[in-house]
């Protein structure tokens, strides 16, 4: 209801507008504030709990989509769209951090790929439903701009979504399938929370090898949404492309979850997943390169419709991009889950993930807003994805183990005052209780 519909709007190219500049600047605002807020979202989540964090995070999406309705009615409301984006950046950081830490803390070690895939499938149903609504509402739309009815439908759905966290079970009452309780994060002082961010990096510095992978995790959306889908196709074509894109994400998430939760050893699964991503990155971007050579920003938009012979190959490439996106995100989350089972540490790690992801996205959306050549943005996308995988490889080799040990659970060993307890102290406390 929230990030899924956000993706559906942005995936139409320019937020459904003819001129994508306002949308690009709004995305700069989203990811700029998000990059800062996400860094500390783990501390907020641990302090106030996941239910409140999710509730506050959901509010910004409704406001953001409402700003596009205002822009449709008042063409000079671009400033409102950008301001709404800045607010959404903070809200989205809270929502994603709470979601990520719970998604990784609920399952047993053998179920993490499945839980991530279930989340990713439900999340992308929002994009599927949203793009289906847009396709139906704009199938015969000749103007190239999304109509008011589409935005109103999205506002209603996101408003419903803000109420859902109220009905969520308290995490401390969750029992895993193996009969164990999830590790409920302590609620220490803000000082201890910031100390936890420091300890996470100090005691587990190899996490930083995942940072390039995190940084590139949203970089590719700009070229895919604005510079490929938004430029090449009619509104009807863009809407159908989005429906297929988010549907393929569900397929991609389920497919890679089977690999990540297979009977193979966890290290073997990690290397297999890495190999799949590397293959997908080079296959899709080699294919896309031949299309990108055919047009520039100065080229008149070809307005490729769904009935055109040129449509088939390009829509299948877009479907493959959807598969790659879901596999990339799920692999990123799975690698974090392979490092830790503790919800507190995972909240910090997801905060790092979203912060760097937002920083990268803010940069590339601004690059698009100032009209850098399409080819430059495309090549930077390809390069960053490849660099992210190369950087992650040594982390997988040295850090991913077949089972997570208590020695690695820094945040789980930190008490309310910020003191880092030894493994022996932790086991003695468990024995006493």
Image (cartoon, rainbow, N blue to C red):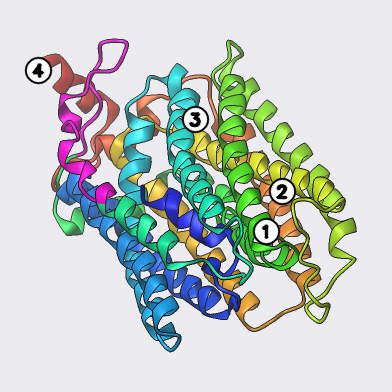
Q: Mark 1, residues whose alpha carbon is within 10 Å: few (<14), some, or many (≥20)? A: some
- State which region is magenta: 160-185
Give the numbered dot on residue 117: 3
Q: Earlier in the sequence, mark 4 or mark 3?
A: 3
**Mark 3 and mark 1: span between their CA atoms?**
22 Å
Q: Earlier in the sequence, mark 2 or mark 1?
A: 1
Q: Is residue 413 left or right of residue 47?
A: right
Pinpoint residue 340: horizontal percent, then vertical percent: 40, 32
Give the mark toward the camera: 4 or 1: 1
Is label 3 in a helix, a strand or a loop?
helix
> Contact (CB < 8 A) between labels 2 and 4?
no
Q: Is residue 216 left or right of residue 296?
A: left
Q: Mark 2, residues whose alpha carbon is within 10 Å: few (<14), some, or many (≥20)? A: many
Give the mark toward the camera: 2 or 3: 2
**Mark 4 and mark 3: span between their CA atoms?**
35 Å
Pinpoint residue 112: horizontal percent, then vertical percent: 45, 25
Q: Is residue 176 magenta?
A: yes
Residue nearer the viewer, 215 or 415: 215
Residue pointed to by mark 1: 224
């Amino acid at each position: 209801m929230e990030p899924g519909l956000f993706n559906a709007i942005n995936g139409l190219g320019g937020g459904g507008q003819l001129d994508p500049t306002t949308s690009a600047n709004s995305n700069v605002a989203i990811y700029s504030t998000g990059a800062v807020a996400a860094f500390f979202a783990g501390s907020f989540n641990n302090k106030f709990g996941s239910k409140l964090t999710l509730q506050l995070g959901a509010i910004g999406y409704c406001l953001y989509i409402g700003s596009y309705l205002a822009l449709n009615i008042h063409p000079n409301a671009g400033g409102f769209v950008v301001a709404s984006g800045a607010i959404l950046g903070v809200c989205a950081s809270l929502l994603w951090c709470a979601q990520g830490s719970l998604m990784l803390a609920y399952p047993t070690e053998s179920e993490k790929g499945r839980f991530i895939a279930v989340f990713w499938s439900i999340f992308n149903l929002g994009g599927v439903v949203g793009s289906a609504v847009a396709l139906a509402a704009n199938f015969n739309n000749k103007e190239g701009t999304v109509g008011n009815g589409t935005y109103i439908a999205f506002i209603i759905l996101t408003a419903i979504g803000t109420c859902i966290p109220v009905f969520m079970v308290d995490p401390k009452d969750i029992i895993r399938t193996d009969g164990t309780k999830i590790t409920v994060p302590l609620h220490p002082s803000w000082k201890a929370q910031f100390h936890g961010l420091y300890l996470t990096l100090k005691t587990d510095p190899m996490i930083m090898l995942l940072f390039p992978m995190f940084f590139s995790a949203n970089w590719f959306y700009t070229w895919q949404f604005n510079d490929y889908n938004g430029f090449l196709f009619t509104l009807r074509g863009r809407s159908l492309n989005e429906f297929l894109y988010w549907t393929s994400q569900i397929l991609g998430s389920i497919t890679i979850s089977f690999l990540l939760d297979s009977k193979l050893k966890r290290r073997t699964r990690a290397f297999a997943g890495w190999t799949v991503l590397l293959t997908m990155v080079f296959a899709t971007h080699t294919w896309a390169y031949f299309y990108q050579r055919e047009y520039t920003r100065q080229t008149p938009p070809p307005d490729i419709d769904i009935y055109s012979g040129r449509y088939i190959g390009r829509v299948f490439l877009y479907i493959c991009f959807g598969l790659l996106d879901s596999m990339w995100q799920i692999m990123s989350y799975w690698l974090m889950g392979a490092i830790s089972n503790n919800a507190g540490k995972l909240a910090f790690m997801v905060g790092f993930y979203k912060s760097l992801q937002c920083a990268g996205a803010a940069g590339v959306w601004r690059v698009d807003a100032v009209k850098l050549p399409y080819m430059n943005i495309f090549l930077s996308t390809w390069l960053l994805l490849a660099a992210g995988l190369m950087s992650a490889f040594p982390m997988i080799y040295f850090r991913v183990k077949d089972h997570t040990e208590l020695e690695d659970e820094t945040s789980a060993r930190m008490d309310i005052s910020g003191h880092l307890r030894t493994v022996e102290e932790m086991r003695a406390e468990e024995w006493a209780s």
